Amino acid sequence: MKILTESDSGQIRNVIDSGVKNKWNWNWLQHSVEVQLEKHGVKTFKLEAIFQKIDVPGKAWCTTCESEINYGSRGRVAMIDHVKGKSHIRKTDTVLSNHSIKAMLKDSSAAEEVNEPSQPSIRDVVKLPVPLFDRVSNAEVDIFNFSKICCLISV
Ligand SMILES: [Zn+2]
């Protein structure tokens, strides 16, 4: 199966759809359909956003359902009916839900990035007690540094 473009119009009309009652018409794709979805309310879809013409006589490809739609007998009406059909509506709802989950995840990660500087990291929160040996050496270093400063001052 091959997806065709407007540059294949001649081939579609004269070869692929030559024996089809309602031959493919690119203008059909400019038509908008209002659909009542189950989860996402009323939405308007341009047929262009849903269908692609394929190299099968009288058939278009629904990119939402990933299936062939027969327009050969009823033309654009068959495509509109498909968009308003139960199975296509269910698929559209699923696709829109997946998109909104992705958008939600994207939003929350963006919010996290913004909040990051004000939120202490786990390393800052869980402070491990410094072992005694380290504390002594730290103190020694401090004394060394202090005596160095004293020497500089006294010189
Ligand atoms: Zn569909």
Image (tube, rainbow, N blue to C red):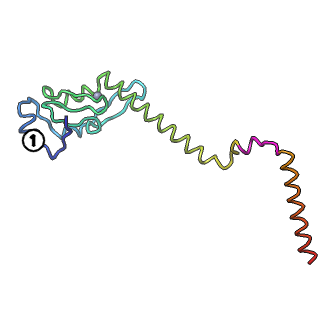
Kindly identify the residue that appears in the image at 25 percent across and 26 percent down: 82
Which region shows up in magenta? 123-130
Q: Is residue 29 left or right of residue 108?
A: left
Most frequent secondary structure within the magenta stretch: loop
Near-viewer residue (15 or 134): 134
The residue located at (24%, 29%) in the rendering is 80
Determine the image quadrant of residue 148: bottom right
* Residue 75 counted in the magenta span: no
Disc 1 packing (10 Å; few <14; some 14–19; many ≥20): some
Looking at the rendered structure, the kind of residue marked 1 is Gln
Q: Nearer the viewer, residue 5 or 153?
A: 153
Is 128 inside the magenta-drawn segment?
Answer: yes
Q: Is residue 97 left or right of residue 54?
A: right
Near-viewer residue (144 or 75) = 144
Report which residue position mark 1 lands on. Answer: 11
Q: Is the shortest distance between ligand 1 and the CB of mark 1 under 8 Å?
A: no
Residue drawn at 85 percent across, 54 percent down: 137
Is the C terminus in the top left, top right, bottom left or bottom right quadrant? bottom right
> Which quadrant of the view contains residue 84?
top left
Element marked by disc 1: helix
Relative side of 22 to 32, left or right: left
Query: If the picture is divided into quarters, which one holds ligand 1?
Result: top left
The image shows residue 4 at horizontal and vertical percentages of: 18, 41
Q: Position of residue 117 (x, y in %)?
A: 66, 50
Q: Is residue 106 above or below residue 91?
A: below
Residue 56 drawn at (x, y percent): 15, 32
